[in-house]
Image (cartoon, rainbow, N blue to C red):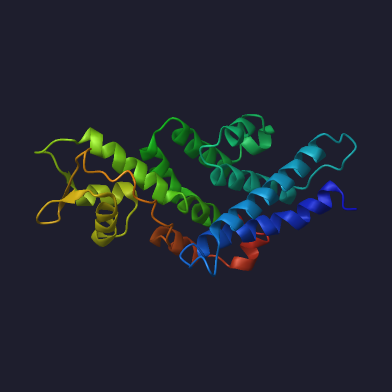
Amino acid sequence: MYDARQKIRLLEPIVMFLAYSRYRLCEESIEKFDPKICNQHLQECLTGVLCCYEELDGQESSAEPTIRELERRCFVECLYQVFNLGSPESFTRALSLPDYVRQDATFKLCFGLCLAFQQGNLYRVLMALPQLPHILCALAATKLQAIRRSLLQIFTHAYNNKQLTVPVPYLLRLLLIDGPAGLQDQCRHYGISLSADRKAVHFNKTDFNHNADLLKPQHERFVESKLKRIYLPEVLLLKKFN
């Protein structure tokens, strides 16, 4: 029977692998990759490792964790927050974590992102997301399509005017979209009109297609640039955090 510390050593790399897989394989067909199964396994492993952390916290006789173990926990706690973005349970957990986790710079960034999401401030969420390190940024990027849809839907009400348009460059920066073609795909999918010269978007709340399926997550350029700079085995084994 494994004790809590042994379980943590087993589960942490599994969590990292599943989190990376969730992003890396997001564009694959359902025959090759089922995101629901990956999500389920990731949630189960995260829950398991968090329970082990709590078990060790409650053991007065347990050995003091090493600096490396503390760093690993902070990163996994960050993953849990990002993966469960918008969940009241994860948000409540964040408020009750030990001080060393809550004071960790990366955790503060993740918590700020989650707080902004809870407050409905999607602008702050989108500005914070590219600041996350490698795997955290990749996992957060799988939430991007839902955030983009929500923001576009908000814009159909905020800019619902026959004379009013929103410049494409502004929307590209705001929505973290690489180029005009990506924005055009979003507009086409949700029934949003572009100006004749395709340099601006015309929002109309009656045109938005609420029945359109959410677009699949995709590889994002700002995430790929981060992942190119890392040595993956080192990151998945939690030997490097930034």
Q: Residue at x 21, y 43 (%)?
A: 207
Viewer-closest of 85 and 208: 208
Which of the 4 quarters of the picture holds residue 127? top left
142 is higher (above) or lower (below) than 128? below
Nearest to the observer: residue 120 or residue 238: 120
Instruction: State whether residue 217 is above or below residue 210.
Output: below
Residues 12 and 215: in front is 215
Tell me residue 228's x, y (percent).
49, 67
Figure disc tally: 0
Taking the image as shown, residue 195 lies to the left or right of residue 240, namely: left
Q: Position of residue 50 (x, y in %)?
A: 71, 43
Quarter of the image for residue 53 reads top right
Q: Position of residue 150 (x, y in %)?
A: 36, 41
Q: Is residue 146 left or right of residue 12?
A: left
Q: Is residue 148 above or below residue 222?
A: above
| Residue extending furthest toward the bottom | 32
- Tell me which residue sits at (61%, 40%) in the image: 104
Compared with 78, 216 (above or below) is below
Q: Quick check: can you spot residue 242?
A: no
Q: Report the side of 112 relative to 94 (left or right).
A: left
Image point (30%, 40%), residue name: 153
Q: Position of residue 91 (x, y in %)?
A: 57, 33
Taking depth in this image into account, of 202 and 55 the one nearest to the observer is 202
Q: Is residue 67 visible?
A: yes
Quarter occupied by the C terminus = bottom right
Tell whether 69 sits left or right of 204: right
Q: Quadrant of residue 74?
A: top right
User: Which residue sits at x=62%, y=59%?
Assistant: 18
